[in-house]
Amino acid sequence: MTTTQFTNVRIIDGTGSAPYTGSVLVEGKRIKHISRSTAPISSGDALTIDAAGSTLMPGMCEAHTHFSWNNAANLAGIQTMPLEEHVLWSAKVAKIYLEAGWTSCVGAACAKPRLDVVIRNAINSGQIPGPRYLAASQEITVPGALGDETLPHLPFPEFSFGANVNGAEDMRKTVRMFLKYGVDCIKLNLSGDNFTPDSPAETHWMTDAEVAAAMEEVKMRGKRGTAHARSGPSVQQALRHGIEIIYHASFCDEKTLDLLEAAKDKVYVVPGIGIIHALLNEAEPWGVTRVQAESMGYAIEWEAALKSLSAMHKRGIRVMPGGDYGFAFTPHGQNARDLEFFVRYLGFTPMEAIRSCTLYGGQIMLKPNELGLVKEGYLADLLLIDGDPLTNLAILREPSRILAVMKDGVFAKHPPTSRAMPWERAA
Amino acid sequence: MNQILFTNVNVFDASGEMPYAGEVLVQDNKIARVSKAINGMRNLPSSGQTVIDGAGCFLMPGMVEAHTHFSWNDQPSLDAIQRMPPEEHILWCAQVAKQYLDMGWTSCVGAAAAKPRLDVVIRNAVNDGTIIGPRYTAPSQEITVPGGLGDSTQPHLPQSEFAFGAVVSGSDEMRRCVRMFCKYGVDTLKINLSGESITGMSSEQSQFTEEEITTCVQEAKSWGKWVAAHARSTWSVKQCVKQGINVIYHASFLDNEALDLLDQHRHSHFIAPGLAWLINTCYNAKEFGLTKEVVQKMGYFKELDAAIESMRALHKRGVHIMPGGDYGFAWTPHGTNAKDLEYFVKHVGMSNMEALLSATTWGAPMMRSAEPLGQIREGYLADLLLIDGDPMTDITVLQDKFRILAVMKDGKFHREPPSLTQRGQPGRPSVPTRWAA
């Protein structure tokens, strides 16, 4: 069993309580002991990391992850990547997330049927490095909606980004297929998206019969449903059918907010506002000017989303970071930017922002009593940060400031030690 | 500029010369200087470089595996390899590619993939840095005929997805198949010219018409590709020479005419027997149902004798043969490839020096590299191994990962030599570390 201790660390435990100085001993895959002294805890053979006052916090949870999005500027650019390359790409991205401090990720859809399942299995078997992962299905959609990338003259399912279904029985069959493949979550595209002008954000597409069929199968197998739901009615539809993980939720009126609040012990909202911000302000190099973004409806959605999400946060609904990183204008690895947006635009305190990816992270990963906090007995998913994220959240997306990443008690990114010093070798 | 100086090493430069005490300077991805130590004096300037004091260890060129199947998944049958889904299969290949480099094979000659694009994708991913692996030439699937080696379809499951190889019949189908693989970007077309006893068609039998073979070779040549053949039977080896097939795998059954042909055309063909498959099928596959009786019945003892005789004869005539072949089955697991060198010494009559040359200088041209590799020589690509031990006296040290202290590919360490600060690993001593936050 490996033992590691961090001495002289400033601990942000993830609950929202004030940081304190102490030392943490990790034994095997769990946090064994936390002391309020900076002195070493173990005098045994533990690897001792003298953290010199840097911050130790729980590994973060990205609640809306797409490993298979390949930093292309559109869905077709993702979809046309061949299968073999796509697997290797996803493996590479999984490693990027882990090393960036995201020790848990909730898969929110993959671009080909088995990609996420295969990556999750490969991580779990130790074949590739990556975060804890809940594997998603493809986006399930209906003809003409977000994710149906077939063209009239190319109607083949292989051309489709999502899995196209039509009718409750078709839905059931598709959901069963993904469950057979071993997914943890079934992703349903309930609303449209301004990214696809023919099916914009405030439209919704699935019949209740279709969603009900999907969720019946999902619950029967003990899995979860997740929903792309930007419009109010689509959020209500998700809640109506017991979908607990709601992506986007940009347009929520009072009634929708009330419904969300009533379900707040079960529901997680993961808005993915990073991409709206990027499309409005930063996507010109990829051909999306501010004017175009506005004409696509993104300015309206941005305003609505800030209002909806701020209200949710005030009502105590769990709003979590992550979402739609993996496009050209939201490259993988910059995900922690969401935390800054939460503070800047949604009225979070920095501590609340951190709690949203730590305490809530353990909950959404279905390990509420053993993951997401720096607490004795908890799984040792830990980050060592150079600096104080409470003063400057931006350091969480700066690789050089993330000194070490530990998952399950094992370093995924080693702290800089004498190993990194210039060396002369003798064999 | 990346500069690394190996001092105090025993240099095996793979020119044929005996190892000598000396120094090797690597600049960027090339070997810049090689010098012999004179009276123990250091004679290359050593400022500004990373200096590796080799403490007398053996420095040799990275090895070339002449017959590699990254996608064979250490299973006992072709069917079990074929059944792996493509997503898992590509991750497997990536894992194996790294393993080869770990074990000192800095170059590998792909000899067939189990699904059409696997090896091309792996080669590209190694080259663009997505994954870690050796230099690689990517092959096609095995091209075969209905009922031949690699046709693992069954009468009630005739779909091509069930076939281990690409099954063609007739010249037109062959041409289409070769074109498809060329379109996918292979470096080499692999064609199965002989049988393989374990599949039911004896290794002494042959398949394909001359016309089909001609079509394959012509089409491959017009795309600038090489052709490699699974050729165990006498007829198939003669076809390789006759038709100009670049790489001849196995060549177990050689009559005098075949030996003469290979001798006369020694500079136009590369021969890799893959003895490991025969030896381990005969002696180390009992737990997979290949008992002595079963193997006897299949004819593998006879083939092993024939293959050893053929290789001894070729070696005696000075025809080069190369190591590698069919690692990746349950009884020839990936990573044990350096056993081939031991087999060459033990069964073929090579000296240790010759075995080392077969894995370096002799095999290097198979990589078709624009820049020279396979020797420690100024201007050559810096693919280097630092070995704890002397392969000139004990060839088996190359089978032990812990004796391969360092692996350098293209001037960069894939595995760094153990440093002073890392001593005691992997038990990791309790040394407090300190750094400024």
Image: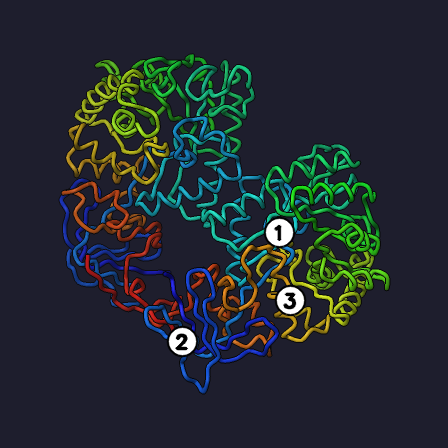
Q: Which kind of residue does numbered mark 1 sit on?
A: Gly
**Precedes in sequence: disc 1 or disc 3:** 1
SS of the residue at dot 3?
A: helix
Q: Mark 3 touching mark 2, by CB under 8 A?
A: no
**Precedes in sequence: disc 1 or disc 2:** 2
Check disc 1 and report the residue beneath it. Answer: B110
Above or below B204: residue B320: below
Above or below B250: residue A141: above
| A27 and B350: which is toward the camera | B350
Q: Chain of mark 1?
A: B
- Using the rendered view, name the quadrant where residue A422 is placed: bottom left
As drawn, the label of residue B44 is: 2
Q: Is residue B418 visible?
A: yes
**Precedes in sequence: disc 3 or disc 2:** 2
Q: Residue at x 46, y 16 (%)?
A: A142
Above or below A397: residue A238: above
- Using the rendered view, name the quadrant where residue A219 is placed: top left
Q: Quadrant of the C terminus of chain B?
A: bottom left
